[in-house]
Image (spheres, grey):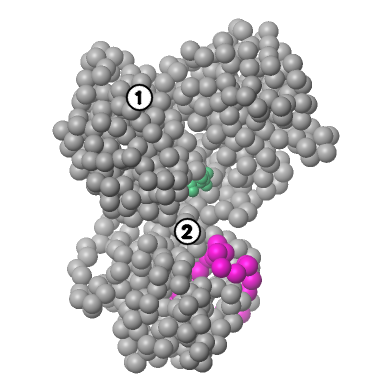
């Protein structure tokens, strides 16, 4: 939800800002802007639309200067427009501010500021910030920013410049991410690491209520009372090439194809001498032993990973498990206590609802474990322990490799708990680990079948588009599955909705007869996950019920399935044979590719779907 960049150094600020915003566009892309100290003046340029519009404008009318801030927006308050785009300024036009977050008390602040003569030109919550800074400014920008943020309720990461103090950029954060890139004769501020990786790998993660001043040759972090806080930069050990498309048409496709290697790497790193090792985890084995129940909390795709986790944890680690979306967990007063392990799953580690749920769980005395992809993210830092998924940067808004990395992490936790709690025999654990490793290899084998653009899933997507038009745009998707693949039905539907804007629902197949079957006529395309499993026969019956009512059927089956041919499904997709426990890792691949190719057929912006953002830092 919005990306911000700040730069001070010797390079052309506009180039650094545009490049940095390009790497943050996944956070929001409905407008973009920059403010640059040029000569003695702050020059602001902002445009509705994607970053390329701002880039074109800056290429026609470049702004000289080596200090500046930039922003890419995901609108919360006020429609996407030039006026509502950031940076925002004060009455005198000397201050410029970019902001990620939401100022909840902005209406009260605006009312007060207006009374004392401040003039506003946008509908945003952000605009109160430069006016507050203007109000408090008495020749010390850092102090004015400190006083201004003390007035704010809500979340913010901000970067500020002032033309009377042309040798610094000031930043501050509370519940929205902000990092400092430490360079040589240059320093950076950004919402996320990829924005600065072209220039430095040394990063300081700021904490809530930090105020940072970056100059050309220094970084000073202070707390709210002005005391210096010493922070050591961390070294980022991945490269910017991992955040590039590497020849793929879209990040989403690249990330789908990375999944086999990601899972192989996770297994290599985490399983040593036949045991699961979580080196960074601060929660001790003894604590795991004492757990009476597990509560998994997450949003979107991470929630689906959590639902899958429940199946494995209950079956193999024998721990009762509940799964909530973060926004529900937060407000429903769940019965959790010090015997509960709360697992918060989040790719970004910044999702506002999940962060709030984490704090709620801590308040209730639970042990909190984070499963995060982004190093140093808020959830990773606030949880009692974190397991990083190490999937590498995920850029496409539609999550793919982060999902399978989360699934892999749940397999690891399950194996770990089963070992500690002795719920599976040593021989049983050995066999499970062997199958898990084999499954990672099978993911790569399966993916290799889809390397060419002319694969069967791409062909089915073409067929769907034709059918969709034939049925006057009334066609849509239903995803049905049972048991451990049921969450994959939800995930398949979510993937399709978010990038193709076609209606899709995921259902436990057994629930069809309790209502949704009323929807079945010749319009829906029904994806039935019917890989070999203990509920295979039940899925065959569901397929018959749908067929009898005219639905178009795509069956995901196990290679060598001899039965399905008798069931007259319209299309089949095969996955290699694997133990049902690990099948979600394989089943999800065709679901992700189906969503991708349908969106491609319809010509949508796959990596940046409308109305969405990668990191949802608003509640
Ligand atoms: C997935 O494709 C989505 N874009 C979205 O549902 C996402 O999984 C959700 O917002 C949670 O994000 P997080 O994992 O960063 O917390």
**What residue occupies the far left of the structure in this picture?**
286
Sequence-first disc among 2 and 1? 1
Front residue (pair 10, 121): 121
Dominant secondary structure (helix, strand or loop) of the stretch shown in magenta: loop
Residue 600: percent from left, percent from top: 67, 42
Residue marked by disc 2: 618
Residue 461: percent from left, percent from top: 70, 33
Q: Give the side of residue 93 with respect to residue 232, left or right.
A: right
Name the disc covering residue 433, or none: none
Q: Quadrant of residue 275?
A: top left
Can you see residue 89?
no
Residue 247: percent from left, percent from top: 55, 45
Q: Which residue: 45% across, 43% down?
A: 325
- Secondary element under disc 2, as helix, strand or loop, is loop
Q: Which residue: 40% across, 49% down?
A: 330
Q: Is residue 451 above or below residue 392?
A: above
For the residues labelled 2 and 1, the Cα–Cα distance comes to: 32 Å
Q: Is residue 22 above or below residue 549?
A: below
Give, as a single range, the part of the protein colored magenta: 61-82
Q: Is residue 359 above or below residue 334?
A: below
Residue marked by disc 1: 314
Q: Give the side of residue 78 with respect to residue 226, left or right.
A: right
């Amino acid at each position: 939800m919005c990306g911000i960049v700040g730069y001070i150094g010797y390079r052309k600020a506009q180039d650094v800002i545009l490049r940095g915003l390009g790497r943050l566009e996944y956070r929001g892309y409905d407008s973009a802007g920059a403010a640059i100290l040029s000569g003695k003046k702050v020059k602001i340029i902002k445009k509705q639309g994607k970053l390329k519009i701002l880039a074109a404008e800056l290429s026609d009318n470049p702004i000289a200067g080596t200090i500046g801030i930039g922003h890419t927006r995901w609108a919360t308050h006020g429609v996407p427009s030039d006026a509502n785009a950031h940076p925002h300024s004060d009455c005198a036009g000397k201050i410029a501010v970019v902001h990620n977050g939401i100022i909840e008390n902005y209406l009260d602040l605006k009312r007060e500021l207006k009374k004392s003569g401040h003039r506003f030109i946008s509908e945003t919550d952000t605009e109160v910030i430069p006016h507050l800074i203007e109000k408090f400014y008495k020749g010390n920008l850092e102090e004015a920013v400190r006083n201004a943020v003390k007035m704010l309720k809500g979340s913010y990461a901000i970067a500020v410049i002032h033309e009377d103090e042309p040798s610094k950029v000031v930043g501050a954060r509370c519940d929205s991410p902000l990092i400092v890139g430490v360079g040589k004769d240059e320093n950076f501020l950004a919402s996320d690491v990829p924005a600065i990786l072209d220039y430095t790998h040394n990063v300081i993660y700021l904490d809530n209520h930090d105020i940072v001043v970056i100059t050309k040759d220094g970084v000073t972090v202070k707390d709210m009372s002005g005391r210096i806080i010493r922070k050591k930069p961390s070294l980022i050990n991945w490269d910017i090439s991992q955040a590039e498309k590497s020849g793929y048409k879209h990040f989403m496709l690249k990330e789908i194809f990375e999944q086999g290697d990601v899972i192989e790497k996770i297994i290599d790193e985490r399983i040593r001498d036949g045991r699961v090792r979580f080196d960074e985890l601060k929660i001790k084995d003894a604590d795991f032993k004492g757990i009476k129940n597990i509560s998994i909390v997450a949003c979107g795709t991470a929630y689906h990973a959590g639902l899958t986790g429940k199946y494995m944890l209950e079956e193999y680690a024998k721990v009762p498990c509940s799964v909530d979306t973060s926004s529900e967990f937060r407000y429903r007063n769940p019965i959790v206590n010090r015997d509960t392990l709360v697992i918060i799953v989040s790719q970004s580690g910044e999702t506002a609802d999940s962060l709030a749920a984490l704090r709620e769980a801590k308040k209730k005395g639970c042990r909190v474990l984070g499963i995060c992809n982004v190093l140093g993210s808020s959830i990773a830092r606030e949880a009692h322990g974190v397991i990083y998924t190490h999937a590498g940067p995920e850029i496409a808004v539609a999550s793919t490799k982060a999902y399978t990395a989360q699934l892999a992490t749940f397999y690891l936790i399950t194996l770990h708990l089963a070992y500690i709690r002795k719920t599976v025999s040593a021989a049983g654990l050995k066999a499970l680990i062997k199958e898990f490793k084999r499954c990672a290899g099978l993911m790569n084998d399966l993916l290799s079948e889809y390397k060419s653009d002319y694969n069967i899933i791409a062909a089915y997507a073409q067929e769907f588009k034709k059918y969709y038009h034939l049925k006057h745009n009334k066609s849509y998707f239903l995803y049905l599955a049972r048991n451990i693949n049921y969450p994959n039905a939800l995930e398949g539907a979510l993937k399709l909705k978010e990038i193709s804007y076609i209606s899709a629902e995921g259902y436990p197949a057994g629930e069809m007869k309790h209502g949704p079957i009323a929807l079945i006529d010749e319009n829906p395309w029904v994806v039935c996950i019917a890989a070999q499993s203990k509920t295979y026969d039940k899925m065959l019956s569901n397929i018959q019920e749908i067929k009898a009512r005219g639905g178009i059927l795509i069956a995901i089956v196990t290679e060598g399935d001899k039965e399905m041919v008798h069931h007259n499904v319209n299309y089949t997709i095969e996955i290699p044979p694997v133990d049902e426990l690990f099948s979600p890792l394989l089943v999800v691949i065709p679901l992700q590719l189906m969503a991708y190719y349908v969106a491609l057929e319809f010509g949508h912006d796959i990596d940046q779907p409308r109305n969405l953002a990668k990191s949802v830092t608003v509640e």
